[in-house]
Image (cartoon, helix red, strand yellow):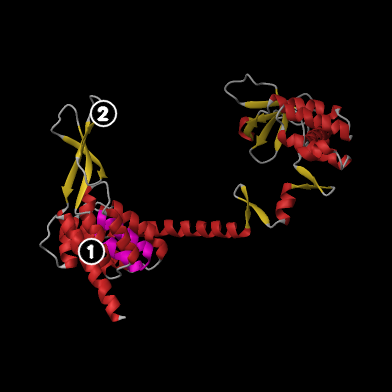
Amino acid sequence: MWAGVFRPAGAGFAAGTYSKDTIVTRFRCRTLAAAMLLLVLSVPHARGDVFLLSQGGQVVGELQNADQSPRETYVIKTPEGMTITLARSQVKQWLRPKPEDIEYEKIRSRYPDTAEGQWELAEWCKERKLSAQRKVHLERVIALDSDHEAARKALGYTKIEGKWTTQREVMTKQGYRWYKDRWRTQQEIDILEEKGKANFVEKDWMQKIDRWIGWLATDRAEEGHESLLAINDPTALKGLAYGLKHNPHPQVRVILAQAVAGLGTIDAQRVLASTAIEDGVEDVRAACLELLKKKHHPAIIEYFVGRLRDRNNIMVNRAGVALRAMNELSSVGPLIDALITVHKFKIASSNPGQISSSFGTGGSGAGGLSVGGGPKILLQPIQNRDVLDALASITGQSTLGFNVPAWRAWYAAQQNREAVDVRRDK
């Protein structure tokens, strides 16, 4: 029966058939080769290059046809002496171990499985910066000799009250947890996680706000406007403040200022106060002041008073405008001090008549400074008209002009009169 099916041995497989004995023999050989391949794939510490297979798994061995170009096959000799040929498509990645890794695989079996032998091997690994392998052998040392001091210390152990313990064990007992590269208390971790959640929400708000601002220039302008003004989550402040500072359109910034005011928090009012001084468009600054007048928070008055001492004279006058809008009597004294402020200006030496930039405020004096033959520094007293207007509006006193001593005398008299009235009421 077999003779009519198989051709004599020696003919090519594709050219004809084989005898029954030949087929059985080749089948057994291929089965054995497959079993040997599985063995190669399962060797955990085999020496040589690692070839990751496209279908999963890996082969470890030495590439025999490294010079082949272009690469068509991988001829690999395994540590057991078997040669395997893989098509290029079968190999996903070829990993070449470092020389020290190969050397480690060659010599590690030479060290006995004793505390001393494993310690020597751990030290060998340390010299060659093989950290993972070193840790394996250090742990084997203390498994063989639990009181091996050098190995214990190398693994981070400390002896406390006669007992070896790690920093992790000590810190864990004290209630600490390893979190984001540091030991932290549970309270710190909770705060960081809440902050992380808040950052996520802030980013989400920024995307929504940016989208709604974009709608303002489309047929969805009304929807965008309503969406912005409907925001009532304080975590949206960062996104609104960014738009209020960077959006190029004044009318959009006014809408954003209204949205900021709608949050109702002191942080929101601080954003409006800063915009009321820093924004380059008067209409935007005025809109912010109108919104701030409704709350009249002491911290905002304090902020505007502080800006009366600004290095930039323009900002001093804007602070005067802001305090006039707030109509706060407690700001009268600082306004008097800011009626005339002295600012420093740098005059380029090439053109002594030209002031190149202002960069500070001075006291009540005036004069000029120069450094060598370079630019000159001019101290220039400046009368601040908006500050005077604020004083006149708040106090009702409009006849003293920029006469600072007269203003101070008047203010002192007002304070004395108030003190006398208080004593009479008692």
Q: Residue furthest top?
A: 67
Distance from Cα at disc 2 to Cα at disc 1 = 42 Å
Residue at label 1? Answer: 412
Q: Is residue 75 left or right of residue 391?
A: right
Q: Point out residue 210 in the picture as x, y percentages from the top left corner.
A: 34, 56
Q: Position of residue 238 (x, y in %)?
A: 38, 57
Residue at the disc numbered 2: 371
Q: Is residue 285 visible?
A: no
Q: Amino acid at mark 1?
A: Ala
Q: Position of residue 309 (x, y in %)?
A: 27, 51
Q: Within 10 angstroms of label 1, few (less than 14), some, or many (20 or more) residues?
A: few
Residues shaded magenta: 254-277
Vertical order, 106 against 419 (above or below): above
Residue at (17% x, 26% y) in the render:
350
Mark 2, secondary structure of its residue: loop
Which three-letter amino acid code belongs to the residue tagged 2? Val
Q: In the rendered image, which quarter is residue 191 located in?
A: bottom right
